[in-house]
Amino acid sequence: MEYRGYDSAGLAVNDGTKIEIAKCKGRLKALSDLTNGGETIQGTSGIGHTRWATHGVPSDTNSHPHYNSNESIAVVHNGIIENYIKIKQRLIDKGYSFQSQTDTEVVVQLLDHYYEGDALAAITKVMTKLEGSYALGIVFNDHPDELFAVRKDSPLIVGVSESGNYIASDVPAILKYTRDVYYIDNGEIVKLTRDNVSFYNSDLEPIEKELKTVAWDISAAEKGGYEHFMLKEIHEQPKAVRDTLNPRIRDNDIVIDELNMNEEDIKNLKKIFIVACGSAYHTGMTGKYVIEDLARIPVEVDLASEFRYRNPILEEGTLTIIISQSGETADSLAALREAKRQGMKVLGIINVVGSSIAREADNVMYTWAGPEIAVATTKAYSTQLSALYLLAMHFAKVRGALPQNEFDTLLQNLRQLPEQIQSILDNNVTQIQYIASKFVAVKECFFIGRGVDYTTALEGSLKLKEISYIHSEAYPAGELKHGPIALIEDGTLVTAILTQEDLYKKTLSNIVEIQSRGALVLAVTNEGNEEAVKVSDIAVYIPVTDKHFTTSLAVIPLQLLSYYVSIGKGLDLDKPRNLAKSVTVE
Ligand code: AGP
């Protein structure tokens, strides 16, 4: 399971008289060393966990399993408890104390609070209190031969075999013991003994489930049945975006606790620097357009490798935002240190909890995309955009730059993004596979757009470059005539992103200019824009959303395009040549 998370690990095993717990920071090997290969922790039932930190840095204390004060209940959890702060406070008011910084610990303390001997009753009671996503594994000391599990939104399976029964977040964990599995659905509860498995709904009515047989091998199973991690992560974007947005949208308002900026601080903001590399830089470019248009705060976006050496002028009232999936990019870390050297407040928008940039930033807004394994970023990129939209809207509202009715409409559009991304993934793949077949043989191509369509073009171009090795350039559409159009000749492939209704006409005229010179044009545009199809050779339609958020939708076909072109070229797209997932050198 380490491909799903690997910053700490732990075990809770019931030896028939008590629950033994062993857990520590580090990879599974550290846990194995701690328990002498499992020798020191014996028992016939138990739960284990390898962690991808979301709340609370990787540490021994924040590792799972979490347990109650007398260690009579232990829990492992995959997901995010969105209302954990409120629950934690209520429990503290009832006299509970907490050891960890995690959201998960509230689950085991709630179980302690409701447990009076009936495990299933306590579990269903706790389920009514939790908001967010969870797959839970639970052991109770006075139920030594039983194991409980429950699921909401995070995956959970049950494996059955002659030698015992298992719960897991995913198939790879149990494949070497059995291929016979039950897939658990939302709201279902499982009780396992060595010889029996029972399923219940949230009203504790017994339910029947169909036993399935897994045909995958381990490697395919780690990719969730997808051929590559990149494709799996492209398809994980609806959940990743939802997990990043939802905890910060409360009572139809945006609440970003981790920002640590009060209304005065936000009103006094004079300038924002966004500093990053690669795709993270592209999200910063999008963020510039959105923050400036909504919040009317000047935003300067810099490549970290340039920022750190150009002696930037950072003044009072400047917020520096460092965006990084890995949180380990050397140039971005150096840029953070330069901003801090000049006395600036630094906000990190980071995916890896406890990473170097996360630790050195003054505040961190985590993107809860989960582990991103493919070198070419997709879901982390999408969650970075989501974080920037939240910031832009929050700043705009606090500074009185956005009337309430417009804020409400934007929030509605923002909340729809996950299912709109899903609809593209459900409906456009076949068309994009066909288009990709036209790109496989090309030697070079261009991506163009205006406004945020230009920032989408940058990301689409990088995706194609880094996993299909086709030379690609992204230009502001209005810039073509200042030189680059000299490169357009018969058959040149150009992808035009056309989502900005107030700029359509301008970009359409750019398309006519290049078509008259022989270019083949792929248009990515909003459903209903019949204009585009008249001047392009093929059009990919995306759902309509607010103009500030279109990058989140227009980028999906471009991610899929680069993926299928790379497939067509038979390349190792999860590990592209010359690239690393995290560039920890200058
Ligand atoms: C994007 O697909 C690339 N892998 C690369 O450009 C990446 O975005 C860049 O290296 C920044 O990485 P970071 O977000 O981990 O800092």
Image: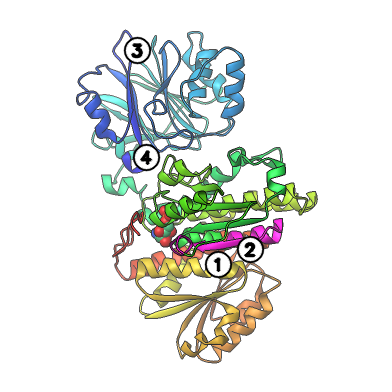
The numbered disc on residue 143 is none
The residue indicated by pointer 3 is: 144
CB within 8 Å, label 1 to label 4? no
Q: Are marks 2 and 4 in contact (CB under 8 Å)?
A: no
**Location of residue 466 with respect to 423 vertically, above or below:** below
CA gap between label 3 and label 1 equals 56 Å
Residue to which mark 1 is pinned:
455
Q: Residues within 10 Å of mark 4 (few under 14, many from 20)?
A: some
Residue at left 39%, top 9%? Answer: 142
Q: Which residue is mark 2?
A: 289
* Quarter that holds the C terminus: bottom left
Task: Residue under label 4, please give it.
Answer: 5
Q: Residues within 10 Å of mark 3 (few under 14, many from 20)?
A: many
Please tell me whether mark 2 or mark 3 is closer to you in this view: 2
Q: Mark 1 or mark 4: which is in front?
A: 1
Marks 2 & 1, CB-CB < 8 Å contact: yes
Q: CA distance from mark 2 to mark 3?
A: 58 Å
Q: Identify the mark nearer the N-term, 2 or 3.
A: 3
Q: Amino acid at mark 2?
A: Tyr
Secondary structure under the numbered disc 4 in the rendered image: loop
Which circle, 3 or 1, is nearer the viewer?
Answer: 1
| Secondary structure under the numbered disc 3 in the rendered image | loop
Percent of width and height locating residue 169: 39, 35
Cα separation between marks 3 and 4:
28 Å
